[in-house]
Image: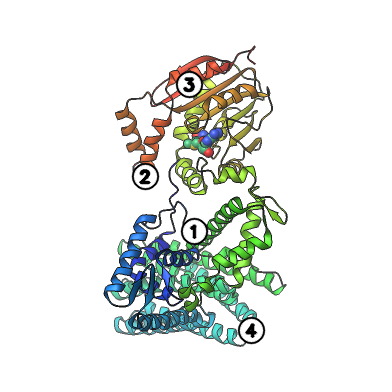
């Protein structure tokens, strides 16, 4: 199994890539807490990283390994020493008067920056920014419209000025705590705009209008579209963070404006191409979209007026949601490690440990920025613990302990979340070239099978082979077994999505199958054998659970395949994927068996080989001998 590489979301990765630039300042801030040894300085960095979901285990973060990171910090300290800001006495580093002066300056700058960010994320600031943007856009459009004599641009400018008014409304509403009234007005306005746009588009079907396709109108539409899109993202982010419904309405409105601008651009292009019908069609689609969002918001509004809580997570930006989930996952994984290392652990003791390690108030930069986790920390830890208990990785109750399943999750032999997610995503579009032909091959090779067979897939991963087999054997019931808790969860989801009802995903490994003896008609397994810790024990287990005369269809990488062929195959099929994954796939061949070795394993476990085919992969069909033990 490859070292687990942590892949932060793209945006966060870019942020981390800037990190070395800030190392000297960070060291100065760490030393404001008192003199520190080098390991203590590194610990200061680690505590800072916890806040971003990085808990410093086997990950490689933004190109840094543990060694290169340590070297970069060392280099930054040396630079500070040369500049006379830091001095080393024995093992300990301390600030000089010059260092203290620079640290104090940095502290003030962090505080200012923190206040700036806090201000920008305040709902009222968002409505003011919206107002400013709309005024600037309206003025630009009106000037451009007057110069070019474009009626369209002038009326668009007037529209934008009206949006400025809605920002004023939101600002006043938020100040006076009258969010609900403002929300009603905004939703009604949106419905009105949607109906108006729809009427105009329908009207144009019967009375076509000439669209003015001048350069200024074109440029205004592009500029306005881009600005509205950015504004919408900003409004949505703050709205979901602060839970302000009027801001959601404004964000949807800004997004609609971006779509309208895209519609205008399409209309202009259609005019240039002499295809005016497209403009009308786009107009209709845009009107339908505005109406749809208006109706959705109206329904949300009615629910809110009835006192129901609004689900803001629906509006969360994709990358923000992804990052939040990632942080939750990282925290849960870290907790699992702590409980495994220190457990059994009482809940209060774990919470105290988290406060001690994770509280951002103890990290100078975060404290100055005002980005402490503070009260939220306990909620997050409790949430992560609940997830661990739900997943069966940690025992429920007041004293926490890692279960056997949890230990499997911690083991590096088992696929983690990222590996399963990556594999499932990469494989799903390829199942018809990979799993579907294998399913056909298995069914065609089988001498016989009962009408409603029980089939077990060992190392099922996301369960794709079961899904494909079910298409050919509609009466079959399936059990997918995998030692990775995330694979089990993914297999469940994939089977539900595929409408596979008679499918059960069970956690377990080949060497100890969670299935009763002598009940299975067919065992299948694809590209898993080479990962089993004890292949002989796995084959014996398969033999145990099969009915006498039951079949095993096994496909795996073929180590006997010429190296140049596998390399070429892996390179060609891995185009566009990470180099490390390509290397990992090539290494997997080295761990695999030859067909002869597999035959020997099976014969030794009480199987009779029916078919053994070789190529890039090996395929063996075997039957459990009637008299096997
Ligand atoms: C390359 S994936 C193949 C997944 C699936 N069979 C497919 O074809 O899409 C290998 C799977 O084998 C599982 N695996 C690893 N060790 C195993 C073991 N000892 N017993 C059963 N499955 C194992 C992994 O968790 C992983 O899901």
- Nearest the camera: 532 or 358? 358
The label nearer to you, 3 versus 4, is 3
Q: Residues within 10 Å of mark 4 (few under 14, many from 20)?
A: few
Which residue lies most toward the front here? 90
Q: Which of the two discs, 3 and 2, labels the residue nearer the N terminus?
A: 2
In the rendered image, which quarter is residue 272 located in? bottom left
Looking at the rendered image, the quarter that the C terminus falls into is top right
Label placed on residue 178: 4
User: Which SS class for mark 2?
Assistant: helix
The reply to whether the residue tagged 3 has its Cβ within 8 angstroms of ligand 1 is: no
Mark 4 vs mark 1, CA separation in Å: 43 Å
Label placed on residue 55: 1
Label placed on residue 598: 3
- Nearest the camera: 428 or 257? 428
The label nearer to you, 4 versus 1, is 1
| Figure check: 492 above or below 610 | below
Residue 158 seen in this snapshot = no
- Nearest the camera: 358 or 432? 358
Q: Which of the two discs, 4 and 1, labels the residue nearer the N terminus?
A: 1
Q: Which of the two discs, 3 and 1, labels the residue nearer the N terminus?
A: 1
Mark 3 vs mark 4, CA separation in Å: 73 Å
Q: Residue at x 26, y 73 (%)?
A: 82
Mark 3 vs mark 2, CA separation in Å: 28 Å
From the image, tell me which residue sits under label 2. Answer: 580
Tell me where residue 580 appears, x and y as whole percent: 37, 44
Q: Residues within 10 Å of mark 2 (few under 14, many from 20)?
A: few
Answer with left or right where residue 584 lies relative to residue 348: left
User: Which SS class for mark 3?
Assistant: helix
Q: Which of the two discs, 3 and 4, labels the residue nearer the N terminus?
A: 4
């Amino acid at each position: 199994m490859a070292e687990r590489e942590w892949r932060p979301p793209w945006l966060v990765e870019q942020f981390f890539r800037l990190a070395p630039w800030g190392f000297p300042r960070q060291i100065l801030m760490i030393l404001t807490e008192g003199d520190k040894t080098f390991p203590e300085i590194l610990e200061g960095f680690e505590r800072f990283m916890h806040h971003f979901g990085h808990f410093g285990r086997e990950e490689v973060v933004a190109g840094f390994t543990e060694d290169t990171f340590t070297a970069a910090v060392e280099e930054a300290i040396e630079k500070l020493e040369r500049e006379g800001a830091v001095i080393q006495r024995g093992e300990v580093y301390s600030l000089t008067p010059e260092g203290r002066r620079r640290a104090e300056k940095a502290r003030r700058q962090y505080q200012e920056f923190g206040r700036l960010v806090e201000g920008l994320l305040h709902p009222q600031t968002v409505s003011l920014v919206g107002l400013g943007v709309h005024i600037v856009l309206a003025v630009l459009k009106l000037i451009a419209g007057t110069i070019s004599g474009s009626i369209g641009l002038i009326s668009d400018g007037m529209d934008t000025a009206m949006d400025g008014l809605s920002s004023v409304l939101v600002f006043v509403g938020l100040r006076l705590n009258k969010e609900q009234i403002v929300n009603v007005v905004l939703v009604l306005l949106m419905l009105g705009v949607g109906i108006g746009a729809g009427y105009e588009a329908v009207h144009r079907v019967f009375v076509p209008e000439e669209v003015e396709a001048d350069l200024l109108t074109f440029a205004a539409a592009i500029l306005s579209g881009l600005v509205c899109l950015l504004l919408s993202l900003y409004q949505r982010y703050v709205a979901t963070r602060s839970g302000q419904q009027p801001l959601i309405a404004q964000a949807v409105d800004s997004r609609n404006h971006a779509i309208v601008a895209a519609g205008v651009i399409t209309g202009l292009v259609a005019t240039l191409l002499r295809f005016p019908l497209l403009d009308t069609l786009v107009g209709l689609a845009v009107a339908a979209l505005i109406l749809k969002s208006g109706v959705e918001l109206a329904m949300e509004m009615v629910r809110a007026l009835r006192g129901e809580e609004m689900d803001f997570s629906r509006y969360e930006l994709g990358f923000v949601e992804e990052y939040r989930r990632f942080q939750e996952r990282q925290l849960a994984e870290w907790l699992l490690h702590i409980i495994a290392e220190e457990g059994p652990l009482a809940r209060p003791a774990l919470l105290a440990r988290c406060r001690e390690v994770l509280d951002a108030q103890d990290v100078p930069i975060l404290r100055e920025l005002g980005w402490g986790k503070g009260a939220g920390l306990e909620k997050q830890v409790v949430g992560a613990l609940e997830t661990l208990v739900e997943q069966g990785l940690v025992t429920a109750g007041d004293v926490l302990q890692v279960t056997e399943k949890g230990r499997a999750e911690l083991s590096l032999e088992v696929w983690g979340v990222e590996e399963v997610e990556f594999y499932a995503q990469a494989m799903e579009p390829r199942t018809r070239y990979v799993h579907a032909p294998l399913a056909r091959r298995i069914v065609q090779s089988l001498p016989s099978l009962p009408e409603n067979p029980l089939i077990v897939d060992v190392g099922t991963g996301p369960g794709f082979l079961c899904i494909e087999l079910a298409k050919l054997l509609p009466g079959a019931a399936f059990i997918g077994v995998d030692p990775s808790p995330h694979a089990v969860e993914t297999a469940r989801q994939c089977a539900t999505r595929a409408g596979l009802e008679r499918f059960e995903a069970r956690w377990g490994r080949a060497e100890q199958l969670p299935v009763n003896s002598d009940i299975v008609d067919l065992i299948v397994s694809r590209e898993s054998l080479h990962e089993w810790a004890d292949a002989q024990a796995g084959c014996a287990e398969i033999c145990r659970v099969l009915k006498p005369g039951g079949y095993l269809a096994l496909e795996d990488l073929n180590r006997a395949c010429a190296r140049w062929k596998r390399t070429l195959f892996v390179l060609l099929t891995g185009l566009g994927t990470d180099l490390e994954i390509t290397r990992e796939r090539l290494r997997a061949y080295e761990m695999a068996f030859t067909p002869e070795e597999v035959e020997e394993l099976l014969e030794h476990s009480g199987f009779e080989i029916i078919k053994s085919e070789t190529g890039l992969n090996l395929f063996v069909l075997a039957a459990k001998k009637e008299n096997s033990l």
